[in-house]
Image: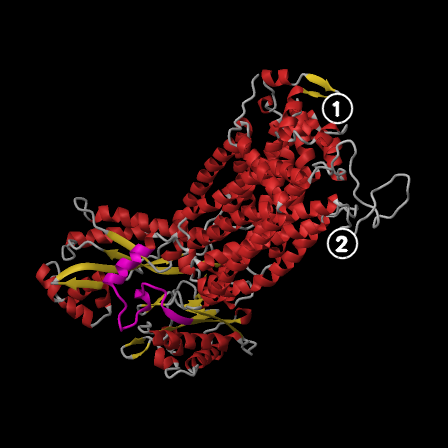
Amino acid sequence: MPACNTNCFEAPLSKGFKKLGLVVGKHPWVFLLLPLVLSGGLGVGFYFLDEREANDIEDQFTPTNGQAKKEREYVKTYFPHSDEFSQLRLYTEGTYASLIVFSYSNKDLLSKELFQKVIDMDHKVRSITTELERGTYADLCATTNGKCASNAVLDIVSNAATTTIDYPLHQGMFLGSTIGGVTLKPNSNAIQSAEAVRLFYFLKDAKTEMDGSENGAWLQAFIDTFSKEIPDDMISVSHFTSISREEEFERNSKTVIPLFSITYVVAINISIALCIRLDCVRNKVWVALAGVLSAGLAVLTSFGLLLFCGVPFSMPVASAPFLILGIGVDDMFIMISCWQRTKVHDKVEDRMAETYMEAAVSITITTLTNVLAFYIGLLTPFRSVQSFCMYTGLAILFCYIYNITFFGACLALNGRRERSNTHWLPCMKVETPDEYKKSNACSVGGAYDPETGAEKEMPINFFFKKYYGPFLTNIWTKVFVVFLYAGYLAGSIYGCLQLEEGIQLKNLAPDDSYVASYYDNEDRYFSSYGPFVMLVIKDENFQYWEKSARENLNKCLKEFESSDMVAKNMTISWLDSYEQYGASTGLDISDKSVFMANLSKLFAVSGFYLDVVIYNRKILASRLFIPSINIATAIDEKNMLNFFRDTASTCGQIMDLSNPADLLVYHPAFIYYDQYAVIVNNTVQNIVVATAVMLVISLLLIPNPVCSLWVTFAIVSIIVGVAGFMALWDVNLDSISMINLVICIGFSVDFSAHISYAFVSSSEKTPNEKAIDALYNLGYPIIQGAVSTVAGVVVLSAAKSYIFRTFFKIMFLVILFGAVHGLVFIPVFLTFFGVCGVRSVEDEKSQTHVDIPGVQSMTISNAIQHLMIAPDDSRAFMHPGYNMRRVLRLT
């Protein structure tokens, strides 16, 4: 059966890297110094870091093309903020401070004794001052009828001795968002007790830069005041402001900086531990340090360049250096592994050529897949994801460049030291080992395997070849692996079905932030009632005065109220009020002229003039407010958003079949809810596009199409596993985890591509032998890479931030499942299809053995390939331990 090779790209790429290895081996100092100069120059870009930081949560974590943003522009145009403040009618969250006052032991906060403490908190807020000219709340507050907008609950409860307080509506005022933990009297809407009260303090919109500074100063003073513990054993207070999310989000970066220092130390120590040798000449301590330094230089160069170019630096980018450190060290282990299998007596440049020819193609595959996966992530509509992908993708590219230049130069210099047989630390020449002469390990070194001419094998390589490989290729082990994979796949699919969408805003702040406490108490006490959603009638031709039109509108409202997410009979409608006003005054509002002429009378006795846009005696637009309820989870938010938009579309048909009315639903919270509309589609889009790209790269660079399909299979399998198990680990599908799934796409290729490439390149005859050979050559480097990458992110598990803990969780899953696929599943699955390992008839003919005087028996093709690789290297060619099988595999 003929083999199916697609090495038209792989073969010339290998030859090109062979030439590069020769150049690096001959001129290492050039390739050492140029990256240092480049990184030093571009690293100055970190001077602009503070200017480039992007901490606007709405800008970074909501879709750039979100429907709610377009709807907000319409509302802003037709219903701009008025000098008369109305919280209900804000098209933004506004500029405000808020307190949640709640009682201990579930005591009634509305009792006279406890409510006096609420009043005291109100006085405390109003007494806050700043050093600016307008530094009091009275100077800055949003006003209604010339007075600061008050908290109605304070006035109502103050008169509780003589007034029964109905809930949630009391004399037309909605209390669902200001009184929480309510217990009603039996068979009544009257409040019996309440556990919490929420107070709002809105400031005027900033029209000038000075206004913004004054508002910001007062809000900061508010935060400082209530950040101190309230000395009271009966009540507690949570506080929040409109600047709190961004302020606390920015603080996230400060919590992770110390962790990076720890990570760097851990990475250095692990790299040294994995590269250390008992032989004082063959020791790779300096090489390990160079590999870690190379990754650090890549971060310095790439980040500095993008900061110079003005690319926004989003908070998730702060986790990228942890990732780059792992990737750089992973590639380092591959190159060291290839170097150790070259012949120690060859010239350094020849050893470098052979190292590059084997390792560079492998790390090129993984680099291309990683970089393209991140750049595909730029297609997402989340700026935080785009920023992360831009920085990380470029950093991986520089990490690759520095690995084949800076690190290669360090490897060549270390090779020169080894060739001169000098000690790794004092660099003094030591004796070569002599089995007839006793010596200590510090004064003797430079041992090698006389049969292969290469460095002595690590014990773990011997383990993979003699024990693990044969065990894994045993028929019963293969059966067990198949059942194990079936269990893995079943658990993954189950987890995917449990996956929830959306990021909770409190997760953008550190765990110990007062923001998290406020959101927790908000969920605890005020989750029964959601926002009042604007229903905007955009249709200029809607006949408000016609009775049939009003009836159709009422039918539409009944459609909304049919859902258990909408409160019944609580809709705020100027049109209903106008009908009641007309009935009480005897006006026939079914007449157009009467309808339009008397609207001003309604507006004079209500605030509804803010809800109707009239131009040239024509109503251009109007709005009503529909109350939502039972919106407690991210799923509830998603369902509510979809329900309101779908119902608004349906209502347009109900109101006028011949000319459907144009309706719009909006609330400021919809800006954040919009992530639910795009997160799944964009994640699937990224995965599908990236998987297709990975398949193309694998087909081009792995010289066997069937094995390329196995690599693609591994990508899909690992992504499904990560998505499923992250759901079981309490991680939602949001813009943060989307970033990590982009990482997953790239990383899922790494280990499987290494093993598949080694399997295809192996000169062994049977699939089982090829699998054993691939594990023998790359099993230990995969373990090294997995351990080093996990070590690079493990400290993030201790971070006090959801962002960085999520990064650790998903990276851990990616590396774990990637390593299991590379070391267990893929080697077994590759043996099931002999096409990946069957030689062609021509190959078999070319394997005829010949005897060359002075050289062990070898095949004709091996001899030809050796002469093509090193025609002048007669010493190596004549060495009785020359590994001709390796020459075949490399070429």
Type of amino acid under label 1 = Val
User: Relative to 454, is 845 on the left or the right?
Assistant: left
Residue to which mark 1 is pinned: 855
Tell whether label 1 touches label 2 (CB within 8 Å): no
What is the number of the mark on residue 614?
none
| Residue 488 visible in the current orientation | no
573 vs 659, nearest the viewer:
659
Is label 1 in a helix, a strand or a loop?
strand
Quarter containing the N terminus: top right
Instruction: Pick whichever of labels 2 and 1 is earlier in the sequence.
Output: 2
802 vs 290, nearest the viewer:
290
Q: Quadrant of residue 163?
A: bottom left
Residue 263 in picture, x, y percent from top left: 63, 56
Q: Is residue 230 above or below residue 253?
A: below
Magenta-colored span = 69-97
Is label 2 in a helix, a strand or a loop?
loop
User: Relative to 245, is 799 on the left or the right?
Assistant: right
Q: Is residue 341 above or below residue 675?
A: above
Q: Is residue 706 above or below residue 167?
A: above
Q: Quadrant of residue 864?
A: top right
Residue to which mark 2 is pinned: 425
Residue 556 in picture, x, y percent from top left: 26, 51
Question: Is residue 760 one of those drawn in magenta?
Answer: no
Type of amino acid under label 2 = Leu
Question: Is residue 95 one of those drawn in magenta?
Answer: yes
